Image (cartoon, grey):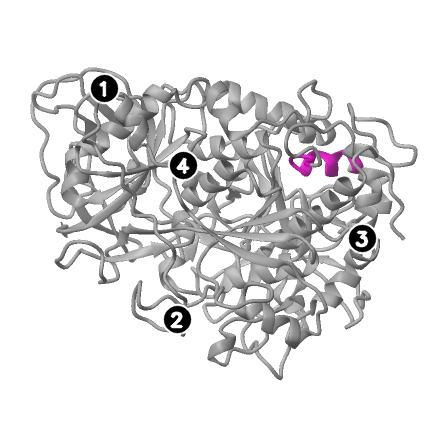
Amino acid sequence: MNRRLAFVAAAVFAIALAACGGGGGGAIPNNQPPQATSGLGNVPAALIVQNYGQSMMSGATYVGPVTNAHLSFSVLVHQQNAQALIAYAQAVQDPTSSSFRHFLTPDQIAAQFGASQSDYQKVAQYFISNGVMVAGWKQRLLLVVSGSQTSMQKAFGTTFGLYQKNGQQFIAPMTQPHFMQQIAVDAVAGIVKYRSNHSYIIVPPGAGAGLNVGYSPSTVRAAFDYVGAINAGFNGNEVNLGIIGTGPIDTTVSGHGDVDLNAYLGATGTNSAAIVTQVAVSPSPVATALATLGNPAFPYSSDFQSPPPVTAPCSAQLPNCNPEDGEAQLDTQQAATLAPFSHVLFYLAYNASDCDINFPGPCPGSGTNAGAPYIGIVEADPEIMQAINDNQADVLSLSYGGGEPQQGWTGYSGTGGYEGSYSQLEFAELATEGIAVFVSSGDNGSAECFSGNSYLAQVCDSYPAGDPSVTSVGGITAPLSGYGQQTAPWLAWGISTYDGGYGACDSQGFCGASGGGSSATGGIGIPAKSWQSTVLGVASREQPDVSLIGDPSTGVAWLMNHDWNGEVQDIGGTSVAAPQMAAMWADVLSACIQHPTVGACAGGGGPHPYRLGNAAPYFYAIYHCSATPCPALGSFTPQLSYSQVFYDIVYGDNQMTNPTYSPASPIPGASAGPGYDMVSGVGVPFAGHLINAITGLDVP
């Protein structure tokens, strides 16, 4: 993995809309983290940041001043009705609601729920007038603001310093940020650049050609009955399968659109795969709108650019060193081969003014803190914004996350009329468009919180997998023959799986496990929505919802760096399971495209009538069905019973080792058992029978 892509900044702060004045603030003494200051000098009508990420600053040490840095933050412009958006997003997922599958376009989202056109323009104008570049999208949720340290300090009324925590150096405000005039901003993400998000991918020790090269696509297709769906013609045809990119792929090739995918097909003997298209983030300009406010002199500008060409493996920095990303290759290869006639849209953002000071590079400016640009996972927000703006992806796969309490869910309690993370609004908008989102549940069992280079020995589930608008995908241990036949029972992925033939730990002593748990005990209490609470009788969000391959010891074949002598290796993690599940859902949607009046496919409207929205409610409805004929859940009646569609994981647990301690100590987890459990969810689906259960179509 490229070290630049390992984590995402996720600090969120809230704004109190209040006029403040009084005494002066001041710099933070050496070796002290920044503290909130109540006095701001003579600042008329200032907007004060009441909670700008101090929790991330706990335990941080001041290193020294920062000069010539370039920074980028996501700004949540005040929404007209954020609570109504969240409510509508849940209604379109609820088969018992009259709004079920009444999906909206991004323009409709903006008109009904998003920031007003005037507020969106005025907030953009404020930043542009301070010399900051602004990027926006037509749903009017976030603005991404980027600029020099000088411009950002002016816009946020603070100075930035260099801090260190858990071995990581990062930039943070030295005094409490504030705006110099009243603007309609509810939250800002990333102003504390401490990074806690990471991708979920595990390469077993010793993996490589001549050892275990992992299951081929044909093996996976046979094991989980993708082959039945594909042979029936339900193969993702006419479906757009999106991937939120964690880093570069090499698209300088014809054929299937990706160098390594082309080579992967030959190496694994795979006869079909989707075409991959890279979608660069291209925000909508706001200059024309600003001109209508009488400010034609304020130019729109954005430093989002087409990603630089992919290079050979290297340790220098962008743009001249841009090696491939293993997570990205894994996601595209699994998605493209399991929904082989879909169109894979790979969203990748490159912001040349969002710079990491830890890696000296060519960012604008000069000096020791100029830094090198980020690409990929750190830019997940604009990638998701682009997917919402375009409304082209029918399914999305995300293979990253972090501990729920660390992802900002509790960081916002301002004027927006809801409690939670600004990310909740992103996923609510995706759900409102009917886009099914699959997110890997994590590889750290019930201990997803991360500190420095270690996982914390505490119960902590993963976000965004636990968001109420997505489907959380866990991982299992799946012993298979080369023909896709079970050679032993499928098990929960955790310590109990490691018995000689299965489950080697990595070089740091980390033995992975399927992420899972309850937000009530492992996070901060994200409420369960009706599709889960009604069936399971729980009050807080539990995950995962469903599972596929995760354990790297029964992992899949994977190829990267083909042009630089890369070989097929085996790989695992819930990063395998999420794109596999997204591909399976793309196959389901292709059945709805071909047969729009059958089963759950009927009744769709708008520009994408075949979309079914979030997949999780359908899974729980099938789980609730113990025999056929099944009872209806609102407008959806499962056509097959639970035992006909899912393999129930009943053995094992998701305990994992904790390499923080020596000797490594187990971190307790949940146990698998009959029915739903917080290791494997409702179980492992079979594609052909899933299509049958949802559509009523016979898939041999």
Q: Which residue is mark 3?
A: 233
Q: Which residue is mark 1?
A: 182
Q: Which residue is mark 4?
A: 408
Check disc 2: other Cα within 10 Å, few if <14, some if 14-19, many if 20+. Answer: some
> Where does the N terminus fall, quadrant-wise?
bottom left
> Considering depth in this image, is 490 or 336 the residue closer to the camera?
336
Q: Which residue is mark 2?
A: 311
Q: Is residue 202 above or below residue 501?
A: above
Q: Earlier in the sequence, mark 3 or mark 4?
A: 3
Amino acid marked by disc 4: Gly
Label 4, label 2: how far apart the Cα atoms are = 34 Å
Tell me if I can see residue 58 in this picture: no
Label 3, label 1: how far apart the Cα atoms are = 57 Å
Which label lies toward us, 3 or 1? 3
Amino acid marked by disc 3: Gly
SS state under label 1: loop
SS state under label 2: loop
Label 2, label 1: how far apart the Cα atoms are = 46 Å
Residue most extreme to the bottom: 210
Which label lies toward us, 2 or 1? 2
Q: Earlier in the sequence, mark 2 or mark 1?
A: 1
SS state under label 4: loop
Task: Kindly identify the residue that appears in the image at 45 percent across and 68 percent down.
Answer: 508
Tell me the magenta residue range. Answer: 611-622
Label 3, label 4: how far apart the Cα atoms are = 43 Å
Tell me if I can see residue 676 in this picture: yes
Amino acid marked by disc 2: Thr
